[in-house]
């Protein structure tokens, strides 16, 4: 697992049943494409990207995205989802090396 990789999310704490809410996510990650060269050695810097993002609500898929090397460092993802009930929104980012960075947020339906 790489150092200094920090996932952050912005999720409304409350919503009405069936209401569409906006979720904003950001993960601090360098996203090395594998195409840049090290300035000192001239060798290629190995590819290391977040290649998969998945958001689930109460264990069911809410949103997913496959990320490719052209995605910039610190990928920001925003999406809209309807929440039918109170529950836990779980976010997972998967790295090339198999590392998974995750965070959970509770949403209360009033």
Image (spheres, grey):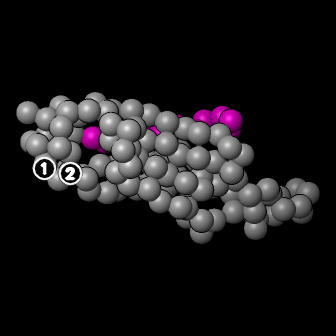
Q: Which residues are magenta?
A: 1-11
Q: Is residue 71 left or right of residue 105?
A: right
Residue 90, horizontal then vertical, whole percent: 40, 38
Q: Position of residue 88 (x, y in %)?
A: 31, 33
Residue drawn 91% across the image and 57% down it: 41
Most foreground residue, 51 or 87: 87
Q: Nearer the viewer, residue 19 or 37?
A: 19
Q: x, y (%) of residue 94?
A: 59, 47
Q: Secondary structure at mark 2?
A: strand
Instruction: Using the numbered discs, state the Cα–Cα distance from disc 2 to disc 1 in whole angstroms.
Output: 5 Å
- Left or right: 85 with respect to 33? left
Mark 1 lies on residue = 19
Query: Observer-nearest residue: 47 or 43?
Result: 47
Q: Quadrant of residue 33?
A: bottom right
Q: Identify residue for label 2.
A: 82
On screen, residue 97 versus residue 37, left or right, reads left
The residue under the point 60% across, 36% down is 4
Is the C-beta separation of discs 2 and 1 under 8 Å?
Answer: yes
Reply above or below: 29 against 1.
Answer: below
């Amino acid at each position: 697992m790489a150092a200094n990789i920090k996932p952050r999310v912005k999720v409304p704490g409350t919503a009405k049943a069936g209401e569409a809410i906006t979720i904003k996510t950001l993960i601090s990650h360098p996203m090395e494409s594998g195409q840049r060269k090290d300035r000192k050695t001239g060798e290629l810097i190995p590819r290391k990207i977040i290649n998969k993002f998945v958001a689930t609500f109460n264990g069911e898929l809410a949103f997913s995205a496959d990320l490719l090397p052209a995605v910039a460092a610190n990928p920001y993802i925003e999406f809209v989802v309807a929440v039918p009930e109170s529950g836990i929104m779980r976010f997972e980012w998967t790295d090339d090396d198999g590392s998974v960075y995750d965070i959970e947020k509770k949403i209360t339906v009033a």
